[in-house]
Image: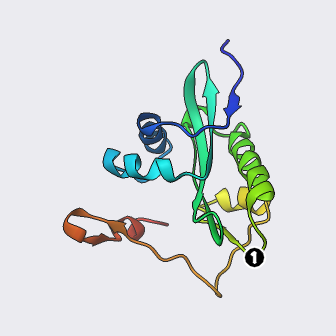
Amino acid sequence: MGEAIELVERFPGVEDYLRIRSAAGMHAKTAEAATRALPNTLYGVSLQRDGETVGMGRIIGDNGCFFTVVDIAIVPEFQGQGLGRRVMAALDAWIQRNVPESAYVTLVADGDAKYLYQKFGFVESAPLAVNMEYVMGPGGERDTSYLEAAP
């Protein structure tokens, strides 16, 4: 049997980031977008097993007023083992140590992931506030077609 899964306080590189997002069924990102984004990570973690990255999570923001938890993903063969909770616990510990009073800490919860995030103090903000979004397409086209397929 392989080694235990180790949490490393380092976010994966572009190649692993793109691979894990895809494997976990998240929206695809281009290598260009990832190359620009990842250096702006305030704090991130990776889950490693036998030298391979099998999970991740990170915090982005302006490091003062706004912090957003993003990219929590576990490859399918390791889902359901509490690894998302382990990633969130590491991110939450960093938030508790580093986020100043009055700052917003946000995330977008997909599906039943909201139950995990509730365990870390997140609450739904609707109807006071709702998530609004689009994905930038070629030539500046705003794409929301992926939302039409949502249940």
Q: Is residue 110 left or right of residue 125?
A: left
Q: Is residue 15 left or right of residue 103?
A: left
Q: Residue at x 55, y 36 (%)?
A: 75
**Where is residue 50 drawn, in percent x and y?**
60, 18
**On the image, which quarter does residue 112 sit in?**
bottom right
Reply above or below: 50 against 24: above
**Where is residue 43 drawn, in percent x and y?**
63, 49
Q: Hey, which residue is sitting farthest left in the picture? A: 139
Q: Is residue 127 left or right of residue 31?
A: right
**On the image, which quarter does residue 96 sit in?**
bottom right
Q: Is residue 96 left or right of residue 117?
A: right
Q: Is residue 63 visible?
A: yes
Q: Nearer the viewer, residue 62 or 22?
A: 62
Quarter of the figure with the N terminus: top right
Which residue matches tag 1? 102
Reply above or below: 48 against 108: above
Q: Residue at x 48, y 77 (%)?
A: 132
Q: Amino acid at mark 1?
A: Ser
Q: Nearer the viewer, residue 12 or 128?
A: 12
**On the image, which quarter does residue 78 sit in?**
top right
